[in-house]
Image: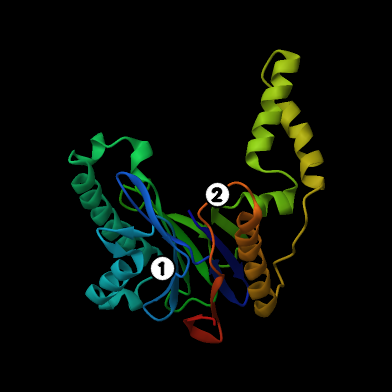
Amino acid sequence: MSVAVLANLSDGLIIGVDSAVTYSDANGIQKVFEDGEKLFRLAGKLGAATFGLGGLEGGSVGSFIHEFELARPEIGTLAIKDVAEQLRAFFFEVYVRVGEKAYGVPFDEIPPEKKGILGLIVGGYSPGGFLSEAWEIRIPTHADPNSVRQICAPGTFLVAWFATCAPIERYLFGYDRGLLLDTSKFMEEIIGRPLTQEEIDRYTPIRDKHAYSIPVDYMPIQTGIEYVRFLVQLVIQHYRFTSTHAVVGGRDKIGVVTYKEEKFQILE
């Protein structure tokens, strides 16, 4: 899998990823490279990150992004939402073609557990925009036209994470979703019925009280870069030492775009 972290701040947008890239086919994972590329500049001013599948049809995801960009020189003039929608349509077409070739059946007949996920995050500034925004694409989930998801609108400041992110959630909240689900099931077994919405609502403030509060509304860009790097490294280092073997690794890679500089920069 992968980890990707996004910070949308008042002064700009930051995306961080690990560098492990997984290549799979119908028989499962065939190779993991720890020096792969999953962070890209798109049309100069936008950043794009990928997670999930590391390649399609014998090529890296990056090679397809380059193909997409060369065939559409006008994307530099489009709103980010429209760029994301064109990316969705492009990658979904490739994804269907690759899946049908690999399994020899129509795409709809391929079992869901065999399809895998290709995720993309696209963020930056739309033409004339003075605040950054970001969108998420998940293939094949986002099969329908205009089904891409807006992660954050201009003026919505947040930090979000994608793909393999349990270590981040444990760090920030003190639990992961699996623990919360198992605890709920345990409580339901004890009381002999499902929890009511009122009971869940009463528990939520107790749970949230112990989460770490990270203010992002006024976070400077450099601090945001360091925070995104920290979260990506947290996941990388966790899976370096744990006995579980999620496909996350290599090194962190960080990209940033600010209102002062229109181009998306990939930092060394």
Q: Is residue 210 above or below residue 123?
A: above
Amino acid type at circle 2 is His
From the image, which quarter does the C terminus lie in?
bottom right
Task: Decide if residue 135 is in sight here.
Answer: yes
Q: Seen in the image, is 25 located left or right of residue 50?
A: left
Which residue is rendered at x = 38% and y = 37% of the image? Answer: 113
Question: Label 1 neighbourhood size at 10 Å, few (<14), some (14-19), many (20+)?
Answer: many
Considering the numbered disc 2 on the image, is that residue within a helix, a strand or a loop? loop
Which residue is rendered at x = 56% and y = 87% of the image? Answer: 260
Amino acid type at circle 1 is Ile
Q: Label for residue 245?
A: 2
Which residue is rendered at x = 62% and y = 49% of the image? Answer: 166
Contact (Cβ within 8 Å) of mark 1 with mark 2:
no
Q: Quadrant of residue 220?
A: bottom right
Q: Is residue 80 above or below residue 235?
A: below
- Front one among 209 and 186: 186
- Front one among 4 and 102: 102
Q: Label for residue 80?
A: 1
Q: Is residue 15 above or below residue 243?
A: below
The x and y percentages for residue 183 are: 71, 30
Q: Label for residue 246?
A: none
Cα separation between marks 1 and 2? 35 Å
Residue sitting farthest toward the top: 192
Q: Is residue 138 above or below residue 186?
A: below
Residue sitting farthest toward the bottom: 260
The x and y percentages for residue 150 are: 48, 57
Q: Which badge, 1 or 2, comes first in the chain's sequence?
A: 1
The x and y percentages for residue 133 are: 51, 67
Q: Quadrant of residue 219?
A: bottom right
